[in-house]
């Protein structure tokens, strides 16, 4: 049976050279090498369908990158990128010089990723290299199914579950890329690696008694990243439909899911000591919207509130609503 992904409505809109190097690869020393890394300064909700940015490439290509002749490149909308790990880095030119010459990112001159971060108007703590695995999918999306906004492409197809045809890199090849990247990053930043899917330093632990409190410095965004990759911790069979699902003027649903029965599940994440009343008001509004606008006749809508500390008042309120409270803790090893 083929694997399936529920992809994000937001597409991965990238330069033509980037897309060609990820999907078709670039030639170096007589070999075809597929690019598997991507620089980003904001949180990435993956997997995403790969689409092309309009206009010319914004950053300086290396001779290898220029040899791609990617100006007229077109890509069928049948490739998705899934982020396997995110590496928090410092913007080091020597590191980029090595990464842009060892087979990882050779289509770019080192100044390209360096300036990408140097010119970014965000906190440098958010600079990251994403290790992506690209898959060809059975489905093929068309232009009519993609809204092309100035800042992002958005899929319009209602059902966003896709079937994986094949990964473009074999398991062994991908492990080689991962090892090469991690060796370079460790060389320049001994403590900079932060894995997204391999949760050795941050483990979400289900607990009924909530005997241990969560670490108070954990942000909702970090918790959301962990949960997205470990939905079975919340409930077996949960499928993510969309993160940060916008429902003006009500707000944004943290995680909009469906359960094993096909019913909608609204997941709301709250940090340490969030007021009970604000939690209930918020998720009740979200559930009402989903019931009215998305659910079909007879389709159930329920909620899961994820909190960091036991709250008896919240638990009593949830007993008379279609809500479940889940507590979590972070284990540092």
Image (cartoon, rainbow, N blue to C red):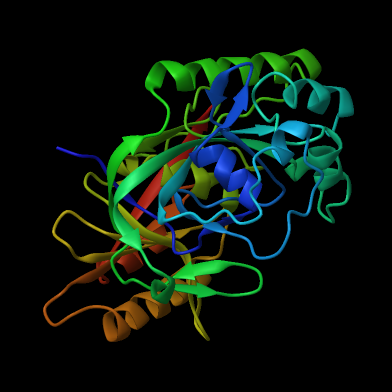
Work out whether residue 60 or residue 188 is closer to the camera in this orientation and state it: 60
The quarter holding residue 177 reads: top right
Residue 56, x across and y down, in percent: 73, 59
Residue 115 visible in the displayed image: yes
State left or right for residue 217 relative to residue 209: right
Residue 141, x across and y down, in percent: 36, 63
**Residue, x 51% and y 33% (percent of image)?**
330
State left or right for residue 48 relative to residue 36: left
State left or right for residue 315 relative to residue 42: left
**Residue, x 50% and y 50% (percent of image)?**
224
Residue 215, x across and y down, in percent: 60, 37
State left or right for residue 333 relative to residue 243: right
The quarter holding residue 12 reads: bottom right
Number of numbered discs present? 0
291 above or below 243? below
93 above or below 13? above
Q: Which quarter of the rendering shows the C terminus?
A: top right
**Residue, x 29% and y 86% (percent of image)?**
292
Work out whether residue 209 or residue 24 is closer to the camera in this orientation and state it: 24
Work out whether residue 198 or residue 9 is closer to the camera in this orientation and state it: 9
Residue 65, x across and y down, in percent: 71, 37
Q: Which quarter of the rendering shows the N terminus?
A: top left
Residue 124 visible in the displayed image: no
């Amino acid at each position: 049976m083929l694997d399936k992904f529920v992809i994000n409505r937001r597409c991965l809109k990238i330069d033509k050279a980037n897309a060609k190097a990820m999907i078709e690869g670039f030639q170096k020393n007589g070999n075809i090498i597929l690019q598997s890394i991507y620089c980003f300064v904001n949180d990435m909700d993956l997997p995403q369908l790969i689409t092309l940015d309009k206009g010319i490439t914004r950053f300086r290509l290396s001779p290898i990158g220029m040899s791609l002749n990617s100006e007229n490149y077109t890509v069928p909308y049948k490739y998705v990128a899934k982020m396997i790990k995110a590496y928090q880095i410092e913007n080091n030119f020597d590191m980029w010089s090595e990464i842009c010459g060892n087979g990882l990112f050779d289509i770019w001159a080192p100044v390209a990723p360096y300036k990408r971060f140097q010119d970014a108007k965000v906190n440098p703590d958010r600079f990251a290299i994403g290790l992506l695995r690209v898959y060809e999918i059975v489905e093929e999306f068309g232009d009519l199914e993609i809204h092309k906004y100035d800042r992002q492409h958005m899929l319009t197809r209602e059902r966003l579950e896709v079937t994986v045809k094949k990964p473009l890199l074999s398991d062994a090849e991908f492990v080689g890329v991962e090892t090469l990247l991690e060796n370079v990053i460790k060389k320049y930043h001994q403590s900079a690696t932060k894995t997204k899917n391999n949760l050795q330093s941050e483990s979400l632990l289900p607990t009924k008694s909530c005997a241990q409190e969560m670490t108070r410095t954990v942000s909702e965004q970090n918790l959301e990243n962990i949960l997205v990759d470990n939905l079975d911790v919340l409930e077996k069979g949960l499928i993510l439909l969309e993160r940060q699902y916008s429902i003006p003027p009500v707000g944004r649903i943290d995680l909009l899911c469906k359960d094993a029965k096909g019913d909608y599940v609204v997941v709301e994440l709250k940090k340490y000591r969030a007021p009970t009343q604000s939690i209930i008001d918020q998720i009740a509004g979200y559930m009402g919207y989903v019931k009215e606008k998305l659910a079909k006749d007879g389709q159930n809508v329920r909620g899961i509130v994820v909190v960091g500390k036991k709250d008896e008042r919240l638990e009593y309120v949830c007993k008379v609503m279609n809500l479940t409270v889940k507590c979590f803790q972070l284990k540092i090893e």
